[in-house]
Image (cartoon, grey):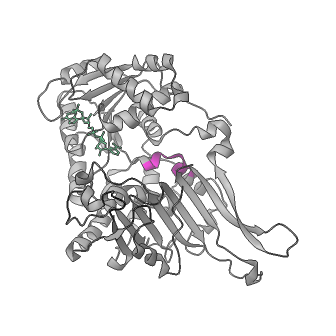
Amino acid sequence: MVSRVIPVEVFDLVIFGATGDLARRKILPGLYRRYLAGQITGESRIIGAARTDLDAEGFRQLVRDAIAEFVAADKRDTAVIEDFLSHLDYVSIDAAKGDQGWKSLKAMIRQGVVQAFYFSVAPSLFGDLAEKLHDHGIAHSESRIVVEKPFGRDLASAQALNAMLASHFEERQIYRIDHYLGKETVQNLMAVRFANILFEPLWNSQFIDHVQITVGETVGVEGRGAYYDKSGAMRDMVQNHLMQLLCLIAMEPPYHFDPNAVRDEKLKVIRALQPVPAEDIVRGQYLPMNGAPGYLEDCEDPESKTESYIALKVHVANWRWKGTPFYLRTGKKLRARASEIAITFKEPPHSIFDDAAGWRENVLVIRLQPNEGMNLKVMIKEPGPGGMRLTQVPLDMSFADALGAEGADIPDAYERLIMDVIRGNQTLFMRGDEVEAAWAWTDPIIKGWEARGDRPHGYDPGSSGPEDALMLMHRDGRRWREIKE
Ligand code: NAP
């Protein structure tokens, strides 16, 4: 099956923070890959902006190096790379001070093409950028801005950020990135749920026992410990990524696959989240091991109470989900880099087979990384003449197998999301009210453990988190799935 590439409209994309880590690792290599695929047409332009004093050629060299480092060898075509680079320009701008560079930027931007500004800089600069774009008459009523996470660190700061952006841009112009939503499997989750009749009748607490959402990382916070220590796993991962995944599982069918219809339904889920009591939260910090520093050394604060791991049991208080818990967990330095959603179904109401036949639950596993794909674990008869014994087998839907070579070539989340910005499709971007509702749920949880002075539990690097997190499920008669690649 060959995927179709539909070219996007001609655009001018300005990347503020174009010399930074995110631009070099994701945004610019992603744009090159879309160019290679034929999705970006020849007249489009990409303009880098940052304080570093570079000319256009200097910036092109930076992007050439980034492509060499971050694009797979079989996608590096020298002629196409040079062609792509010819669409790049650069302007040196300090967003925080002075007016230098803004006039040049204005001169570079064309009228009559899609205009997008990617704020790949620290959030403290978002306000300056929005204001300068406005004051210099660069942005107009159809321009789009893309803002990176973190979007606030609590409800008050998110509200302030929203209000500040709203003073220069309308909501329909603002694209708040959560790159988890750009993953192929995450979107496929909506296709599986809403394009098949099979799952919907079972998609509720009558048939679903529980849901597990896991985002495991093997790396620690080395190098950026002091920065990470100001946020922690709840702010850095749960409030945005895990919450978005939960929403896609729990939401009602939108009336149409339309940006606001989808986001309205997600918002209802967030508003239905119940407060989480202290006993349903386990936080952890990775310990030192074999000479490698632990979290406290990495963050350079021996007294830090910030979590590098969190597990929570969450309830969605509505008709569909009453009685079905969602267990969320995410952490650093865990056993494997693996992200998945696992939906465990209940037992059949009556078993016609002997206990000895062996029965296990149906589980729908949606894997986000590595190997994006889904599989549904079902029971079948164990082959052979040994009588009626049951065995669990996966009905596999890995994209690579199902869709052939083209299917294996899944665009990176950033590529898809940037193309959506150019297409003007906000479905996979968080709306301002969604972000605020997520913080409104998160804030009291964080305030709760701060007021209690809770200390995270230590856990061994390479494990699946603190022992207490196992108990969170054991006491409900359930168990976490193994974290593995
Ligand atoms: P970074 O490596 O520190 O890069 C920051 C960029 O901003 C650089 O290009 C820097 O270039 C530019 N910059 C800094 N001060 C500036 C100013 N006053 N005026 C104009 N440009 C300025 O940061 P990053 O990792 O790329 O992250 C960028 C944003 O993406 C942040 O909001 C971050 O939270 C978010 N994010 C990053 C990742 C990631 O994987 N890196 C993932 C998710 C979200 P000059 O020094 O040349 O000015």
Toward which corner of the image does residue 126 lie, by quadrant? Answer: top left
- Of 6 and 218, the residue lying toward us: 218
- If the picture is divided into quarters, which one holds ligand 1? top left
- Look at the magenta stretch and give its main secondary structure: helix
Residue 90 position in % (x across, y down): 28, 22
- Above or below for 442 versus 73: below
- Of 157 and 340, the residue lying toward us: 340
Toward which corner of the image does residue 316 lie, by quadrant? Answer: bottom left
Q: Work out which quarter of the rendered image holds the C terminus and state it.
A: bottom right
Instruction: Name the residue located 39 percent from the left edge and 63 percent from the top edge.
Output: 270
Whether residue 72 sits left or right of residue 241 in the image: it is right
- Of 318 and 335, the residue lying toward us: 335
- Examine the rendering and report whether any part of residue 154 can be seen: no
Outermost right residue: 385
Residue 275 position in % (x across, y down): 34, 73
Residue 9 position in % (x across, y down): 46, 26
Point out the stretch of residues depicted in magenta.
180-188
Toward which corner of the image does residue 107 lie, by quadrant? Answer: top left
Report the number of numbered marks: 0
Instruction: Name the residue located 33 percent from the left edge and 58 percent from the top edge.
Output: 291
Indicate whether residue 387 is drawn in magenta: no
Outermost left residue: 98
Residue 87 position in % (x across, y down): 39, 19
- Of 236 and 78, the residue lying toward us: 78
- Examine the rendering and report whether any part of residue 22 can be seen: yes
Q: Work out which quarter of the rendered image holds the N terminus and state it.
A: top right
Instruction: Name the residue located 51 percent from the left edge and 28 percent from the top edge.
Output: 39
